[in-house]
Image (tube, rainbow, N blue to C red):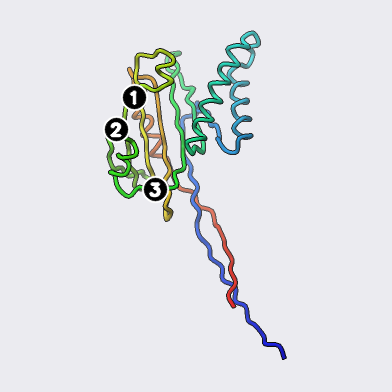
Amino acid sequence: MPERTNTRREQTVRQTPGFGIITPEDWYRIPLQPPDRRESSISALIRRQFVGVDDQPVLRRKAEEQLQGAAEAGAERGGLVLYLSFLEAAGIPLSASLLVSHLHEKFDSLDAVAALSGSGAVEPVTLPAAGRAARLLRRERTKESRRLGSEFEDTIVEYFVPVPERDEALMLTFSTPLEPIADAMVELFDAVAATLRWRHHREETTGAQE
């Protein structure tokens, strides 16, 4: 008589965190992955910005190329989503961007963040909903600034936020070329970072044991 085998199934359930963040209403969101979603989002933005403008094909093409270049560069850095500011104050564009990237490494100390950043002021912070993080503030004249002939430095604020229960981190990179109002823009960046929160969904793995 064949031996009877009892199989006991074991199920492991763990929480896989995503994230949510609240940006100003006039910030446009471009998902960077997969590439087809990125291209579709850029096309939608160009249509929105040039609605009713049919006599500027060169300007439209240049704007689209700049957006594609920025989005592709963000994706190559592990970017998940890129936000671009279209806020205005007294008719003046408040140019800014936010790149949210996924890093497959964990930062256990400020020294590790400082080594990665190379320069700038690093400090520990606690975000209201996302927990502990490291904040880096620096100013630099970027390649884009030099190409455009700008005399101002970009102001960059980066947050390194450990992902709960994983050897991973989320990096928020805020940037603005508006040096004369940089302090006000930094306050805005900090307010946006403070809205970061983790969102969990259930991930199930099922195994069998004899």
N-term-proximal mark, 2 vs 3 = 2
Residue position marked by numbered label 1 in the rendering? 140
Residue 146 placement (x, y as % from top left): 40, 17
Query: Taking 89 as reference, is 20 above or below it?
Result: below
Extreme residue toward the top, this view? 55
Extreme residue toward the bottom, this view? 1
Q: Nearer the viewer, residue 196 or 74?
A: 74
Looking at the rendered image, the disc whose residue lies closer to the viewer, 3 or 1, is 1
Residue 118 placement (x, y as % from top left): 31, 34
Contact (CB < 8 A) between labels 3 and 1?
no
Residue 182 placement (x, y as % from top left): 33, 23
For marks 1 and 2, give the CA distance. 10 Å
Contact (CB < 8 A) between labels 2 and 3?
no
Residue position marked by numbered label 2 in the rendering? 119
For marks 2 and 3, give the CA distance. 21 Å
Taking the spot 50% from the left edge, 60% from the top edge, the residue there is 14
For marks 3 and 1, give the CA distance. 25 Å
| Number of other residues with Cα within 10 Å of mark 2, as a class: few under 14, some 14 to 19, many 20 or more | some
Is 52 positioned to the left or the right of 196 in the image?
A: right
- Quarter of the image containing the C terminus? bottom right
Is 12 positioned to the left or the right of 174 in the image?
A: right
- Which image quarter: residue 72? top right
- Quarter of the image containing the N terminus? bottom right
Q: Secondary structure at mark 2?
A: loop
Q: Nearer the viewer, residue 182 or 140?
A: 140
Q: Secondary structure at mark 1?
A: strand
Contact (CB < 8 A) between labels 1 and 2?
yes
Residue position marked by numbered label 3 in the rendering? 162
